[in-house]
Amino acid sequence: MQILDGKKTAESIRNELALEVQKRKESGKKTPHLAAVLVGEDGGSLTYVTSKVKTCEKIGFESSLIRYDSSVSEKTLLDKVNELNNDDNIDGFIVQLPLPDHINESLIKSSIHPSKDVDGFHPENIGNMVLNVPGFLPATPAGILELLKRNGVETEGKKCVVVGRSTIVGMPLSILLARNSNPGNCTVTLAHSRTKNLKEICLQADIIVAAIGKPEFITADMVKEGTVVVDVGTTRVPNPERERGWSLKGDVHFEEVSKKCSFITPVPGGVGPMTIASLMLNTLKALELKGQ
Ligand code: NAP
């Protein structure tokens, strides 16, 4: 069994990006600038946004963090999105999800200009992904593809089961893995909470991706020998032994499943760091596509 080490793979992407920024600076070109909009005080969202901003600092990108109270109006948020769309200094930006209930998330996603949509959530970018034409791919699925590719995991002709059909992870990943590209060319089954006989379906899989949000849901009896297992889940579970009182658990029962599979991503240190790395790759791409 080999660990698919997202921390290490993301580090090599960061090093490549830092070198690219250095080269751009030396030749007088613009430095990539990522902005992040954070609404409210949710601990998870704050952690994600903070690590995105810190990664920018590490690799020499510029970054801006714009924060609003959870009571911010939809209009104020839309005005900010519009301002960022028109700010030439900002190459790409994200609005951290989830947003409070009084704000229409779909409206916000589709208000971000597709050329600055480095999270890849705009309908135009989703359409481009489906059509297999260039655009911004959603950060977590793109990070998973990069992790598989850089660690030599073969996908062509494999049977893949993606468990979870969210529009940010499971659904786009199922499309990407089925596309005629590398990684890709899998035969994909997309499973969800209404799927019957999930265990039997998973037992057929050469690759299982778990994006459910239920700790240790995928157990050893659901996995055949030699399967590649990608664990997207990150749930905070109480842990009195940790000073902060919780630890992160994935959707896969790591201890038992790791004994059977060929490759597995750990939680933490698997998919999470790759999500941030893809966001950075998308931001550089956004600047390059402007011809700057
Ligand atoms: P989500 O919106 O929370 O949806 C969960 C999905 O799991 C739904 O499609 C649901 O099916 C399915 N599901 C729930 N119970 C199930 C069951 N018993 N059997 C089969 N499918 C079941 O998904 P998400 O936003 O993709 O998040 C999933 C997990 O990934 C969470 O832990 C989240 O924190 C984590 N995550 C991690 C990263 C990262 O960078 N590491 C990024 C994004 C998300 P229905 O559609 O039928 O309800």
Image: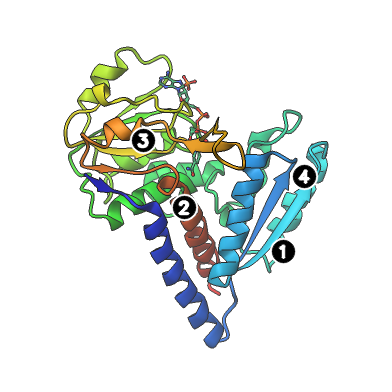
Residue carrying label 3: 174
Residue picked out by circle 2: 273
Q: Amino acid at mark 4?
A: Leu
Q: Which residue is mark 1?
A: 87
**Label 1, label 3: how many angstroms apart (C-alpha)?**
34 Å
Q: Between residue 152 and residue 249, name the one nearer to us.
A: 249
Q: CA distance from mark 2 to mark 1?
A: 28 Å
Q: Are marks 1 and 4 in contact (CB under 8 Å)?
A: no
Q: Quadrant of the C terminus?
A: bottom right
The N terminus - image quarter: top left
Residue 163 relative to residue 228: left or right: right
- 176 left or right of 57 in image: left
What residue did someone put label 4 on?
77
Which secondary structure, mark 4? helix
Distance from Cα at disc 3 to Cα at disc 4: 31 Å
- Which residue: 57% across, 57% down? 115
* 226 to the left or right of 54: left
Residue at 76% of width from left, 29% of height from top? 102
